[in-house]
Image (cartoon, helix red, strand yellow):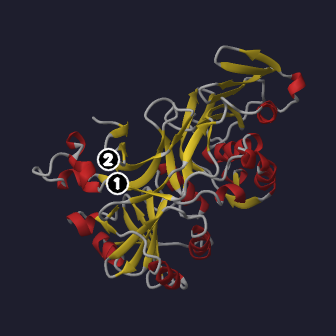
Amino acid sequence: MKERLKSGAIAVLLVITVLLARQIWISPPPTGKKLIKASEVTLSESVTGRLLPFSAVVNFGGGKHTKLYQLKNLWPFYRNLLKQNIADKDDKQWARMDYKEYLKLHDEPSVVFDLGNDTYSDLFKKIYNIDDLKGKLLRIYFSEADGILFETDRGVYRTEKWTPLSAINQYIRTLEKEHYPAYTSLWERYGIARAVYLPEGTPHFEGGMVYRNEIKDMKGPYRTDLVQRLLSTSIDDIHVIREEDSVLYVYGKRNVRLSDNGMLDYHNNSDTTQTVTDAAGALQVAYEFLAKTTGNIDDLYMQRIEPIGSGKRTGFRVIMDFTEKGMTVFPLKGKPADFIELEIYNNRVERLRSIYRNKVEGLGGDVTQEGLPFEEIMKRNPAIFGTAEEGYDKTLKNLNNFFMCYIDDTQSDEKPLRYGYVIDMGDERYIFDGESGVLVGGDEK
């Protein structure tokens, strides 16, 4: 917590001062009127630089693959390739590629980034000037021989005018020497034509990390500083109401409640000029607010942006979760389902609801834990996957994604993170405990 607060001021400066000319906007909430001109909407470099793909598959060639989650040092190089070869080109014409031909290219040295969710598709299409690309953007493929390819839910596309790339194979050869875990695709394992990759054998997690309730035992100076940041005034001007399991801090029409169970609930009901924005503007506001108040914007993954409100009063809900080792941390099944929710109207945060937890420093990082093989997860959940006797092919044809994650039991004041798997099938998401195979999140129907 101390480090997050210390970095707050620096993060604010980054967010406020380093603005790009790159203009983006995502579909506004349905009001029947055009909201903001695209030329008026910007995202700062400190925000766009944090919008990483969810994971990356590295294809070594010859049917060998691995999957990476820690992309902070990897993505900037490929992001620059996108800017130079795609985003800066205004005369793009798209050519479609046969999907099985695309799958064959996964046997060549290449790196494929998975965006992870629909909101990232919208953002990336605007940021990198590919909003005329048909369908929802799923993955971006890079190789020296074949350039840049885009996989969407409508097919695989490349620009008609494209050039080979360089310096990719050198990275791949270096990574291959480090003996990362092996993965195989649905195409290779089950003959299902999808570029979804599953771990071979028993996956390994870096364990021992502990999350704790930061509010219950928060020291006075840190609590005071947090409240002053949220309410933008001195603690001397704040009315403090102590209740059985929480403390309510009130300043004018703004208030924040800190509960012993670890919940932070902030409201801003003060009057403001009626303005409108789009989802990109809401995301910018969300990052600026979190940088100024909690100082925590470095290890967040944005799950989604949802339109909220009705009539003339419309806004957006921005939903985020923490990450560890590049993997998303999910609160254990229950409410709220995510760590951070911000409601944004009139270009300001009117509500922040957060499960206020943090990693205990000095613990973890020296424990390796083994998870169940993917096939064992299917075997233990026949209501979702069917049975081996029936065959898994019909179910797996709907498998959109598989990734590893951590799970936090937020009802405990301090507890090690569990490890798990997230499986997206059709329109449903399922989260499984990696040790027991039990469904702990999602929809069993």
Q: Are marks 1 and 2 in contact (CB under 8 Å)?
A: yes
* Helix, strand or loop under label 2: loop
Residue 77: percent from the left, percent from the top? 60, 74
Which residue is more in the foreground, 298 or 433? 433
Residue at screen point 31% across, 68% down:
184
* Above-or-below relation of 240 to 411: above
Figure quadrant of the N terminus: top right
Amino acid type, mark 2:
Gly
Rounded to the nearest whole Å, what is the CA distance between mark 1 and mark 2?
7 Å
Q: Which residue is mark 2?
A: 426
Q: Mark on residue 31?
A: none
Q: Is residue 274 left or right of residue 24?
A: right
Evaluate whether residue 27 shows in this view: no
Local packing at callout 1 (Cα closer than 10 Å; few below 14, some 14-19, many 20+) is some
Q: Which residue is mark 1?
A: 400
Evaluate whether residue 196 shows in this view: yes
Local packing at callout 2 (Cα closer than 10 Å; few below 14, some 14-19, many 20+) is few
Find residue 250 and report its image quarter.
top right
Disc with the residue nearer the chain's start (1 vs 2) = 1
* Helix, strand or loop under label 1: strand
Residue 369: percent from the left, percent from the top? 41, 55
* Above-or-below relation of 197 to 144: above
Figure quadrant of the C terminus: top left
